[in-house]
Image (cartoon, helix red, strand yellow):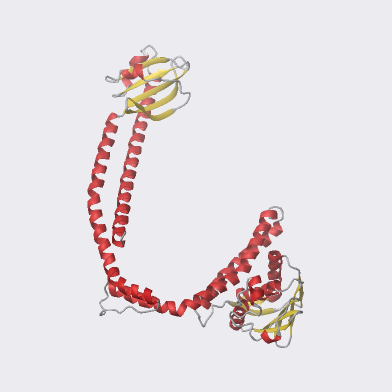
Amino acid sequence: MKLRNKINLYTSVLFICLLILINFSIYLSFSRVMMNSELERAIAEAKQAINGIQTVDASVPLEDILRAYVPINGMLRIVQETGKAEATVTASGQTMLRDELAFTYQQKEVQSIIEYNNLPYAFVTIPMISREGAVVELQVTENLNSTDEMLNRLRIVLVIGTILAMIPVLISSWLLSNFITRPISSMISTMKDIKGSGQFKRIPLPKKSKDELYLMGEGFNNMIELLEVNYEKQGQFISNASHELKTPLTVIESYASLLKRRGKDQPELFDESVQAIHSEAIRMKDLTEQLLLLARNEDKWLLDVKELHLNQIVDESIRSFQKAYNRDIEYKQEAEIIIKGDLQKFKQLFFIFMDNARKYSEEIITVRITRNDQGAIVEIVDRGIGIPAADLEKVFDRFYRVDKARSRKTGGFGLGLSLAKEIADVLGVTITLDSIEGLGTTVKINFPAPSSH
């Protein structure tokens, strides 16, 4: 089926279905309102009859009282607890209700629409105290034929209105399909040529007329340019995102599992888990923003620089990492150190090196915080496979992998250290990497100008 026919068919069906749905909703709403109104009127008539029965002198026959309150097109009946009718009065033309309409003692107040002889009736039952002091029920049955006829007329009007409204819908959908497909049809031959050659070709554009054909051709040419420029950048972004989001997601999953198992019994664990999940969620949000900046090759990163308690941040990060991966981590620190930097970016940097230590080492991981004349130093030491000396200068290059088979096994893409280098440059810190193959690796993150209490 051609696009023009599809547009014509889909828009016509959509508008017709919408029109039918609207009219059906109108009918249902109006019908419900009308029937509820009839029930309320029947309830009011029943209460008025009960009031008359209880106020009129007992010497007046019960049927005479009911006759004064019987609906114009219905019936009043008093039913005893035994299920027998104590008194029944019908309006003229409704005498068949007395003999043909079955009745029972309901034992509660009832209000509903019933059907008798294919006609709707309002049926209301209200308990009352008889003049003899017994509990009985006053049942009101009222013919709703006039309301039913009104609803039938409404149905006819809505059906005719729907049919008449379909005519402009069909015409407008046909005009719309032609309007949309005209510029597309004129460009098909050029697109086929591009598909056959496999080359990124631009569509030759007519004079600048700003009509649909020109705007579509201009947009197509711009799209080709973006594809050529961003094709490789898109792949880099996907690789970075999958690499960097894995760790915070693992932390969140681990703490969520702890909450599920023991969160109700250990309030301190609940508080710690909620704080860790909240912190990791914020870090993921910031990490995503930075990856977007990286994908767009921006020169500037958004920084939120403030004073940071380095010891506390490292301690919280280590605890989250231990919970997530169940690894032994030795933590050594000096007196509290305060630095200036961006909290989330430092956490992102720290987790990159911790994740590498976890993947390439099965032994205990050591984290040390020290200070020297130049500033504060965070060291991450693993006792793993190490890095060959010839590769140390290249590990920060994007997509570079020391051992491609090993990287595939651990899920690496050669992106973690590259991203770490970019984050470090933004934060104004330096990274020193010392490694001996077969013995392990030491990473030093050097912060300038620390201060202490």
The C terminus - image quarter: bottom right
Horizontal side of residue 78 vs 149, given as left or right: right
Q: Quadrant of residue 422?
A: bottom right
Rendered residue at 25%/58% (across/down):
174
Residue 359 spot, x, y in % from top left = 69, 72
Rendered residue at 25%/63% (across/down):
178
Q: Quadrant of residue 99?
A: top left
Residue 412 appears in the picture as rendered: yes
- 257 versus 131 height, above or below: below
Q: Quadrant of residue 329?
A: bottom right
Rendered residue at 25%/39% (across/down):
156
Along the viewing direction, whichever of 10 and 421 lies nearer the viewer? 10
Along the viewing direction, whichever of 164 and 36 lies nearer the viewer? 164
Horizontal side of residue 70 vs 283, given as left or right: left
Residue 164 spot, x, y in % from top left = 22, 48
Residue 66 appears in the picture as rendered: no
Residue 246 spot, x, y in % from top left = 61, 68
List the single residue furthest toward the front. Answer: 196
List the single residue furthest toward the bottom. Answer: 373
Along the viewing direction, whichever of 408 and 301 lies nearer the viewer? 408
The N terminus - image quarter: bottom left
Q: What is the count of numbered marks? A: 0
Residue 109 spot, x, y in % from top left = 45, 27
- 234 versus 12 height, above or below: below
